[in-house]
Image (tube, helix red, strand yellow):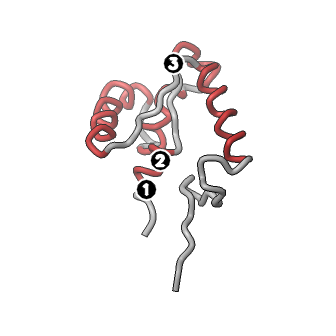
Amino acid sequence: PGIDWGAAQINTTSNYDPTLLIVTGWLENQIEHHLFPTLSVAYAKTHVKPIVEEVCKEFGLKYKSAPTAAHGVFRHLEYLSKMGRGLGTGGRYLGEFGVAEQKKTL
């Protein structure tokens, strides 16, 4: 059946520290933006972020947030490097939701 849409958004998104808001384009709420793209940044940060963090804990999902923008960019480049080498996926192709697709058997 595949992965839940909301879980896919959380698993494939990461927030950045808000110290460089203009440079990063408000990426400190990227997870919330992927879940609720029409919410304002202020509302997402003050009202939605705590709820999303709690739901992640409840369902065992990792809420990813980089401590600095530089750390977030480095982590992203590291992720791209791993995926380019097939690491972390068992050599399987990553489908559109960033989840390794499994072969169907007859």
Indicate the position of residue 16 as horizontal and vertical percent values. Answer: 53, 25
Q: Secondary structure at mark 3?
A: loop
Q: Position of residue 88 (x, y in %)?
A: 60, 47
Q: Where does the image place residue 63, in percent across and percent down from the top left? A: 41, 35
Q: Between disc 3 and disc 1, whose residue precedes?
A: 1
Badge 2 element: helix
At which x and y percent is residue 60? 33, 43
Q: At label 3, which amino acid type do we have?
A: Pro
Q: Nearer the viewer, mark 3 or mark 1?
A: 3
Q: Amino acid at mark 2?
A: Gln
The residue closer to the viewer here, 26 or 63, is 63
Q: Rate crowding at label 3 as few (under 14), some (14 to 19) or many (20 or more) other CA atoms within 10 Å.
A: some
Q: Is residue 53 above or below residue 95?
A: above
Q: CA–CA distance between discs 2 and 3?
A: 20 Å
Task: Determine the residue positioned at 30% across, 29% down.
Answer: 50
Q: Which residue has dot 2 on it?
A: 9
Seen at 44% across and 29% down, the residue is 41
Picture disc at residue 67: 3
- Label 2 near label 1: C-beta < 8 Å? yes
| Circle 1: residue type | Trp
Who's the residue at 59% across and 26% down the image? 72
Q: Residue furthest top?
A: 19
Image-based side of 57 in relation to 63, left or right = left
Give the camera-side residue of 47 and 3: 3
**Disc 1 marks which residue?**
5
Please identify the quarter of the rendering in which residue 97 is found: bottom right
Q: Is residue 104 above or below residue 14?
A: below
Quarter holding the N terminus is: bottom left
Q: Residue at x 41, y 43 (%)?
A: 36
